[in-house]
Amino acid sequence: MTTLSVVMPMWNAVENLPRVLPPLVAALRERRVVEVVVVDDGSTDDSARQCEAAGLRVIPSGGRLGPAGARNVGARAVTSDAILFLDADVVMHDDVPARVAARFDARPDLVALFGAYDDRPAAPGIVSRYRNLLHHHVHVMNAGEASTFWVGCGAVRRAALLAVGGFDAERYRVPSIEDIELGQRLRATGGRILLDPAIQGTHLKRWSFASMVRTDVLRRALPWGRLLQATPDVASALNVTMGERLRAVVALALFGAAIAALFRRSMLGPAFELLVVATLVNAPFYLLVARRAGVVTAIASLFLHQLYYVYGAATFAWCVVEKWLGFAPRELTSGR
């Protein structure tokens, strides 16, 4: 049976630890995992002491490396066959270690697999519930063979990870798309990656509108768009599938019609029709939000979601222009 260790990078996570630590401690006590290694990336709060008091192994990253670098430190410290990476704001479901080990045992060709956030986000507020449920929905709708990787609750065979050099901590010094880029390199070696949404954790992160847009643009769409310009073969991954591209086109058309309607009343009809189309093509997601967070949040999510497509598409378009103009962004010139 595949042996499994947990590696969790951590920086000032004291607020989340009362919920994050118990399932890890239980998994260690019941020997469902070999060890749990918490890599403290220079925390200034009481996080490290709390983890040690819970009986977990805490090692320093050696400086503020960022989560990619901290994960590499943890990967070198364990000796198990596979590593389950968890973010410090994710509460692992109790059955995750068994599901991960079973998948690896059944599929020797798998080098990595990952799951999803569950559909019970802990953080209150419209933006937090929208954002966390969107992540859940995207992963559930794309279950199966994957061309990318996700590290919030994802596992990789240790030998495969070390063989490709681990996460690119030089290029991605802050939380970004280091897991997507790693998945690309793992796939390039011929390995297979599986998205199994039954492998779940509860996300505790609180989102504001500003933090959502900033993260989406600067730490997701921009580096991802640049990666796509350099390596177009990842273009079918999750948020950039053909279906998502078509939904983005609808959102852009809706945005344009809404702006035009401010100046020409004759555009009110087309704008309304496009709003109906946008609702229908995303109906499964909005129904999920309505069930889990209420009708008001679902209505708000409709507009937040269309805005998400607009600024995401605009950022990807900028990456195309950037390449055409011959710019040399850091994501494409530093690191591996």
Image (spheres, rainbow, N blue to C red):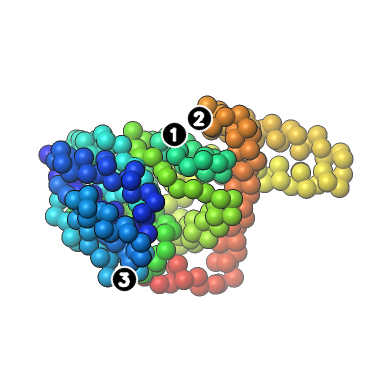
Circle 3 SS class: loop
Question: Which of pointers 3 and 2 lies earlier in the amino acid sequence?
Answer: 3
State the image coordinates of residue 181 (x, y, percent, origin top left): 38, 57
Which mark is drawn over residue 63? 3
State the image coordinates of residue 194 (x, y, percent, origin top left): 32, 41
Amino acid at circle 3: Gly
Residue, disc 2: 292
Residue in front for this viewpoint, 144 or 215: 215
Count the marks: 3
Which mark is drawn over residue 15? none
Residue, disc 1: 119
Question: Which of pointers 1 and 2 lies earlier in the amino acid sequence?
Answer: 1
| Relative horizontal placement of residue 57, taking residue 112 as reference (left or right) | left
| 122 relative to 75, above or below | above
Amino acid at circle 2: Arg
| Relative horizontal placement of residue 164, taking residue 326 as reference (left or right) | left
Say few, some or many: other residues with alpha carbon within 10 Å of mark 2 (under 14 / 14 to 19 / 20 or more). some
Circle 1 SS class: loop
Question: Which of pointers 3 and 1 lies earlier in the amino acid sequence?
Answer: 3
Marks 1 and 2 close (CB-CB < 8 Å): yes
Q: CA distance from mark 1 to mark 2?
A: 7 Å
Specify whether residue 17 is in view: yes
The image quarter containing residue 327 is bottom right
Residue in front for this viewpoint, 75 or 91: 91
State the image coordinates of residue 334 (x, y, percent, origin top left): 40, 72
